[in-house]
Amino acid sequence: MKFSISWLKYLKQFRGEKILSQALRMFRLHSIPFSTLLGNMFNVMELHQAKFTFPIVASVASKNLGLTREILRRGHEVAVHGFKHVNYAYITERQQDDDVGKALDTFKALGIQVYGFRAPYNVYTEDTPKLVEKYGFLWDIGIGYNPKYRSGTSPFRVQIDDHESSFVCIPLNRLSDDFMIDIQGFSSRQMETKLKHVIKGASEKGGVFMFDLHPIRMGQPKYVNVLNSVVEYGTALNGWFPTVTEAVNYWSKHGKWKHDAPFCCLLTGDIDNFSFFDYIQRLF
């Protein structure tokens, strides 16, 4: 089964008649250049000396190397989000292997070092963790979206056959931007309240938690103020906002967070498309 067939099968089963409305939504979101969206987010993060990690689809990164490099230049991190944005539940283990391997080859050819992985759609089969380990990733930030891990407060490893994974996983909170905006219909104020509630709980319990906040939405003028308010709130509570690699390396060495921070908040945001044309190409 080719990737294109897998993608169309996914669209038919889970999107159905919503394909057109989703395409219209993406068209509107992409009316603002992605460089502007990222710039809005960078300004907020620099204001609070916080960092972001962006899992990027490798084929998309290679088409817009300038923006991909700008992420790194501004002090943030790039990770692997597959070579094509295809749902792994619809392809074989070998096709998953090819997708991950090709993504890594692409980033290597671009001269971009990557340490982590998140599967497209946060969908993992029982074979996917084996591939994450096979390719030597330091961390994975999608497995933690599984309901049995979401409420955790510490980095963890998963069981692979007869051993624990060599890579580290992080609990991923359910409150993604697409869940809050597209599914729940939250206003900006409601989003801010919900995210701050999670941060307040983390400041009391300690540990680590992570959000998946896509730049295509969070960089919009309507929502970037939410990001600013949330990061400002978290830093006022002495939270640490590093890249995922910084967090995993520090925790692995010290068993605590830098500056003795009471909690660590990891801000991540998948980049599936840099333009509406990228999005449309996924249909083909």
Image (cartoon, grey):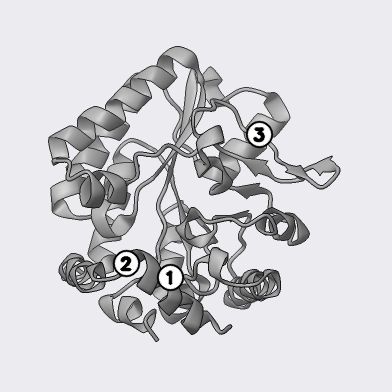
**Residue type at tag 3:** Phe
Identified at 42% across, 24% down, the residue is 239
The residues bearing labels 1 and 3 have C-alpha atoms spaced at a distance of 30 Å
> Residue at label 3?
156
Of 268 and 284, which appears nearest the observer? 284
Q: Earlier in the sequence, mark 3 or mark 2?
A: 2
> Residue at label 1?
10
For the residues labelled 2 and 1, say whether their Cβ atoms are less than 8 Å apart.
yes
Of 188 and 94, which appears nearest the observer? 94
**Residue type at tag 1:** Tyr
> Residue at label 2?
15
Quadrant the N terminus occupies:
bottom right
Q: Position of residue 8 (x, y in %)?
A: 41, 78
Residue 198 falls left or right of residue 89: left
Identified at 14% across, 34% down, the residue is 189
Residue 238 falls left or right of residue 90: left
For the residues labelled 3 and 2, say whether their Cβ atoms are less than 8 Å apart.
no
The residues bearing labels 2 and 1 have C-alpha atoms spaced at a distance of 7 Å
Q: Residue 114, relative to residue 6: is it above or below?
A: above
Question: Quick one: SS at disc 3?
Answer: loop
